[in-house]
Image: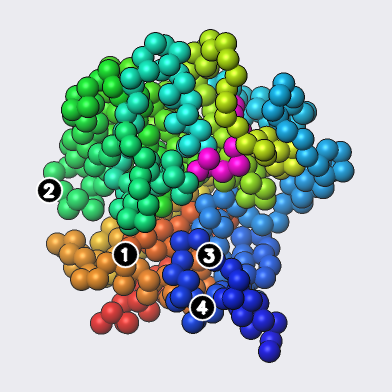
Amino acid sequence: MTQLKQWQHADAAHHLHPFTNQAEINKTGTRVISHAEGAYIYEADGHKLLDGMSGLWCCNLGYTQPKINQAIAEQLQELPYYNTFFQCTHPRATELAEAISQRAPAHMNRVFYTNSGSEANDSAIRMIHRYWDALGQPQRKAIIARDNAYHGSTIGGASLGGMAFMHKQFTPLENIHHIAQPYWYGANADISPDEFGLQAAQELEKKIQELGENNVAAFFAEPIQGAGGVIIPPQSYWPEIQRICDQYSILLVVDEVIFGFGRTGHWFASECYGLTPDFIVFAKAVTNGFQPLGGLLISDRVSKALLSHTDDLAHGFTYSGHPVACAAALATLDILSDGYIDKVRIELSQAMEDYWLALGEHPLVGEARCKGFVGALELVKDKSSRKRFDKNGKAGALCRDASLQSGLVMRATGDTMIIAPPFILDRSDVKDLTEKAWQALDITLKKLS
């Protein structure tokens, strides 16, 4: 038995995978990724793939970053672990909190650490309740989120998320309500994107009025829906959401687990959209995926209320602010500060507009869209009517497999293809990526014909 077969056999016998049909991959055998370099990953059989998804939206600087490796190794020698409970801290936790705050919107100056974005969203729910308790309004428990949103896979995060297939597998938390997403193309809307965006935003106001404004605590949303299909809201959407949150004194939670730390060409997408959030949820790219770390950025007004409590905050995690993870994050922020944010905003976003949007000319693509350094393709049966394929996800699955065949990792969300490549690519790499994507589309079209 080859080494690859041994790994696949052990995997099938002992490993339960997330978001996977286990019975299916046990038959076909898992893809074993053995090593990586730069923006490329390698399968154990030697097949080389351009990683168009930066791992799982997290390795924004690719896989070869000696400075991060060195920071991790040095921290393991100095202080491999200590907690931040019981009036304790350590140098890396304090340095990182300061470094993130310096890069955040000016009104956000306090950080709470978790291990992931899912835990950070759960923590936001806890702190929202504590905020309203401090203001003497404990009845404000209702939280509003959006259909087809993704906020993690813990009970709290998955309840906030608006994905029906996930909700079928557990009982979501009470007091979480959902409104329509700002998905102009998917709604097959016959009005302009800006008009649609206003209407989608005003669904929040309707829901607040339905629930009673004195009962609503917060609104959770991704700046761009990532796992839902890189759904970029119309320009009219976010200004109206901000107006509504301000008018009704609703806390605004912006989930930037994917889009924080440069993906839109800004440190945080909240800046890109001119938002004033009360919480920013972060994770993933903060350590370039080299260590697990997540957390919350908390606004000054919320911090003031939280600090007004005279009892302990009864919330936290064994690994909150883990020193090795914080060291990895500090090194990551240093590297990102060396021109990468500007590179995304100026060079890579332009390359996406020049090359990725041209994929919209392919007969299988109903719409190509991009923002910063993310992109999506809508696969359709008929471009003029936006008619989808009869079995949702069939075309996407074929295209995903075809992209791997073409040497590119591209993710399928139903029949929407999405990418979020590493920032270390240059303009010629983006051209190469889109050529591989076009080849995958050709293969897919042939299989569907």
* SS under mark 1: loop
Q: In 3D space, how far apart are the residues under numbered discs 1 and 2 (Cα atoms)?
A: 21 Å
Q: Nearer the viewer, mark 2 or mark 3?
A: 3
Q: Position of residue 269 (x, y in %)?
A: 46, 36
How would you rate the neighbour count of disc 3 (Cα within 10 Å): few for under 14, some for 14-19, many for 20 or more? few
Residue 86 or 146: which is nearer the viewer? 86
Q: Is residue 419 visible?
A: yes
Kindly identify the amino acid type of the residue bearing the numbered disc 4: Asn
Q: Which residues are magenta?
A: 111-119
Q: Amino acid at mark 3?
A: His
User: Is any part of residue 301 visible from this angle?
Assistant: no
Q: Which mark is residue 190?
A: 2
Secondary structure under the numbered disc 3 in the rendered image:
loop
Which residue lies under the disc numbered 4?
26
Label 2 is placed on what type of residue?
Asp
125 sits left or right of 423 in the view: left
The residue under the point 23% across, 52% down is 185
Q: Where residue 90 appears, x then y in whole percent? A: 77, 28
Residue under numbered circle 1 = 415
* Quadrant of the image occupied by residue 368: bottom left
- Crowdedness of circle 4 by 10 Å Cα count: few (<14), some, many (20+)? some
Asked which secondary structure carries label 2, the reply is loop
